[in-house]
Amino acid sequence: MKKFVKIISGFVYGIVYGAVHLIPGGISGGTFLVIFGCYETVCEAFALNKAEIKKNFLFLVFFLIGTVGGMFGFVRIITFLFENYEVQTKLFFMGLILGGIPLISKIATKKQKYRPACIIPFLLGFALVVSLFVIEKLGFVGTSAEQAYDVAFFIRIAICGFFAAIAMVMPGISGAFVLVVLGVYGIYIEALTNFDMAIIIPAAIGILIGIVVGAKLVLLVIKRHTLFAYSAIMGMVIGSILPLIPGGLGMNTATIIGIICLALGGGLGVVLGKRELTE
């Protein structure tokens, strides 16, 4: 039974992680890894920690399968939901995040209690995510343009993938947003849609290197300054709620259904947190 749970949870978490990273607008896969209670587990795998990979091998294999599936397939479904059922979808994800906040707090305070100094990393994490959201809303970001397929172009694709991947490891920061800022978001999405391996391969190289580097940096901070690190993560996670506040709220059917979705998401977040803590 436990193996089955690991397979299903790894696959589902991977799908969410892979798909939401390709949706611009502040949706962060790292946020949901924290909510799902597997953030450090996945970071250890990204950092190539052999002992942790062996320990969680089954979960990680299906997480990887789900991530690839989410990036190539389920991103269309999630994009469809955001485009056609924005209020309901955003409120569901908002509920999921809110429901997972108690888990983050319990992880942060396993060894020591909060103290007044924790407000500083919390506010820094919150401000970082909110500022990125504001920058995007004000239109201070680039858009992709036609590019010639030459060595310089492929190096640029790899470098952009590297920086986006570091963002993919951080809760509250969207990898897609980084790609938008760097002006290659459209190129990446078109390549994934058309399976253009000439772009996918250099992008994958940059992303893989970026994930390893980003995970090692995150784990270094978490292990040395656990309470402050999770205080910053808490700020990032709460800040990531802002981009999920939908427009069109009011006395209408979409809002009523959306409130139900908010409650369902919140309940799911709480259940996932309790399950992780009792395993």
Image: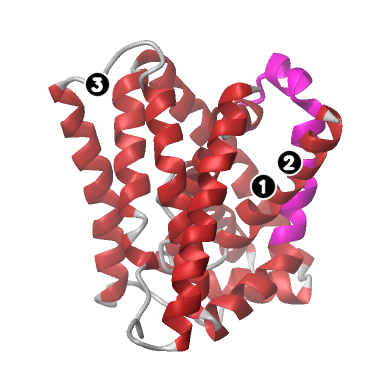
Of the residues shown, which amino acid type is indicated by label 2?
Gly
Relative height, residue 48 to residue 259 (above, below): above
**In this rendering, does residue 25 appear at all?**
yes
Choose mark 2 or mark 3, whichever is in front.
3
Mark 1 vs mark 3: which is more N-terminal?
A: 1
Q: Is residue 112 left or right of residue 85?
A: left
Q: Residue at x 57, y 49 (%)?
A: 268
Q: Which residue is mark 1?
A: 13
Q: Dot 2 surroundings within 10 Å: few (below 14), some, or many (20 or more)? A: many
Residue 46, quarter of the rendered image: top right
Q: Which residue is mark 3?
A: 114
Q: Residue at x 46, y 63 (%)?
A: 262
Task: Quadrant for the N terminus, please.
Answer: top right
Q: CA distance from mark 2 to mark 3?
A: 31 Å
Residue 230, quarter of the rendered image: top left
Q: Residue at x 70, y 55 (%)?
A: 15
Tell me, yes or no, whether the two marked residues, 1 and 2, touch with CB atoms within 8 Å: yes
Residue that sits furthest to the bottom in the current view: 252
Q: Identify the secondary structure beneath mark 3.
A: loop
